[in-house]
Amino acid sequence: MKEGLDILYALQQKDDQLKEIEAVIKDIPVRIKELEDERDSRSDMIEKAKKKLQDNGEERKKLEREIVAIRDKIAKYKEQMKKVTTNKEFQGFSNEIKFEEANIVAVEEKIIEKMIDSDEIMGGIRDAEIEFKKIADSYNQQIKDMLSNLEYHKNKLAEENRNKKELRARVDPKLLKAYDSLFVKKAGKVVSYVHSDFCGVCNIKIRPQILSELILSGDLMICENCGRILYKKIVDDAEA
């Protein structure tokens, strides 16, 4: 029975190892998705700069339309000047034309300012694209490493499942049946390694009588608190 419990404990260790590998395999895609989202969110700096450039262009078009409207107004004033009969009316239209021409100059200055701003924004976009490429390259390398790590763990899982199959073939059928039954009920933790005189899972102290039987008889013993199979490695004189 003692040798059977040794193999059973080895099987428990193998199942614990498989559980850890499966958790890593499950976690890696989540972490990759987080990295992808974080990487893509950094591209906002470029999109914001492009939006600013687009707004600048729309504002310039609006100013250009404003100049066209002012010139239309001036053209109308000049047509009306041809029909005036007094110097006062003529001077009035002349003053209006000068006023609107001054408005054109002011709007043209605004357009020039927008053009200067546009050049600065385009420079900012180029800088943002260079910066984002560095950031994206870093994220992409991390993602590549994680994908390699995922492939490694998938291969490791297949290998350890083969090792588990070999272990299960060595376990006494009755012990294996008890193990499989408890495996479902105890969330995969069937065998509890006994440290000194405490259950390794629930950490409750084991009664001296049960501990003594566990050490001396090597029989199948169950934790009275959590119901798991107790296992304690008994060192021989050579090991001691």
Image (spheres, helix red, strand yellow):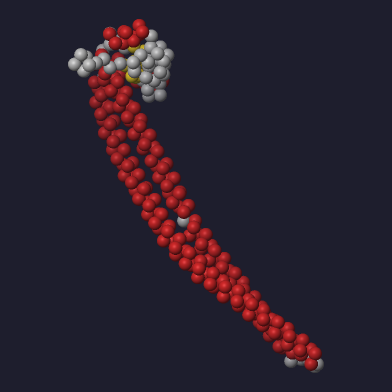
Which residue is situated farthest in the top direction here?
209
- Looking at the image, which is closer to me, 147 or 208? 208
Tell me the residue at 50%/59% (across/down). 47
* Residue 151 figure quarter: top left
For residue 161, above or below residue 82:
above
For residue 48, above or below residue 175:
below
For residue 151, above or below residue 100:
above
Tell me the residue at 35%/32% (across/down). 20
Q: Is any part of residue 16 visible from this angle?
A: yes
Tell me the residue at 39%/42% (across/down). 29
Tell me the residue at 44%/45% (across/down). 34
Horizontally, is 61 left or right of 127 in the view? Answer: right
Residue 218 in the image, given as x and y percentages of width and height: 28, 11
Which part of the image, by quadrant, shows the N terminus? top left
Which residue is situated farthest in the left direction here?
238
- Looking at the image, which is closer to me, 62 or 204? 204
Number of numbered discs on residues: 0
Which part of the image, by quadrant, shows the C terminus? top left
* Residue 220 figure quarter: top left
Q: Is any part of residue 64 visible from this angle?
A: no
Which residue is situated farthest in the front direction here?
240
Residue 173 in the image, given as x and y percentages of width and height: 28, 17
* Residue 91 figure quarter: bottom right
Horizontally, is 164 left or right of 98 in the view? Answer: left
Residue 187 in the image, given as x and y percentages of width and height: 40, 24
